[in-house]
Amino acid sequence: MNLLHVIKTSAVTMIALAFSASVFAMSLQDAKDQGLVGELRNGYLGVAVSSQEVESLVKDINQKRKIAYEEIAERNNLTLDQVAARAGIKNLERTQAGLLVENAQGQLVKK
């Protein structure tokens, strides 16, 4: 095998791995179904079982939620905390039975 063939093969392998990693990336619903995350009363997600992938997912979604809450707050002359708290109540209500939600004691428990 010559060096050019090895480089081409390595490049193709790396591209294939990059695409396959995105296929296997965990979705929020997967994480909820597996009991890895739950809805918090404050409108954000909480981590029940920590891993790098779960932490990254929660951080990304919580950042997106915060941006959305800030936009809603600005449009409606509310504070970020008011919007997040209202969203938290709705998220808890919408969560399917058997998935994790934060209880009054701050623990993630099955709904």
Image: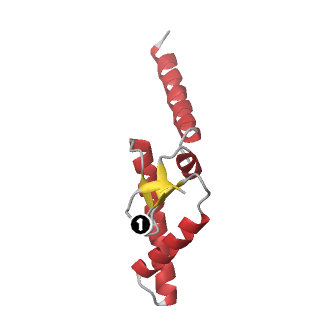
Give how far across and how far down residue 40 sits, in percent.
Answer: 45, 63
What is the image's colouring? secondary structure
Question: In the rendered image, which residue does mark 1 sit on?
Answer: 104
* Number of marks drawn: 1
Query: Among all residues in the image, which is located at the extreme bottom?
Result: 77
Give how far across and how far down residue 59 sits, in percent.
Answer: 41, 56
Quadrant that contains the C terminus: bottom right
Q: Nearer the viewer, residue 12 or 104?
A: 104
Give how far across and how far down residue 68 sits, in percent.
Answer: 50, 72
What amino acid is found at the position of numbered circle 1 in the picture? Ala
Say few, some or many: other residues with alpha carbon within 10 Å of mark 1 (under 14 / 14 to 19 / 20 or more): few
Give how far across and how far down residue 51 sits, in percent.
Answer: 39, 42
Query: Among all residues in the image, which is located at the extreme top?
Result: 1
Q: Secondary structure at mark 1?
A: loop
Q: Is residue 85 left or right of residue 16?
A: left
Q: Nearer the viewer, residue 38 or 27?
A: 38
At 51% from the left edge and 86% from the top edge, which residue is drawn? Answer: 75
At 47% from the left edge and 46% from the top edge, which residue is drawn? Answer: 36
Q: Nearer the viewer, residue 25 or 4?
A: 25
At 47% from the left edge and 68% from the top edge, which residue is drawn? Answer: 43
Q: Nearer the viewer, residue 56 or 46?
A: 46
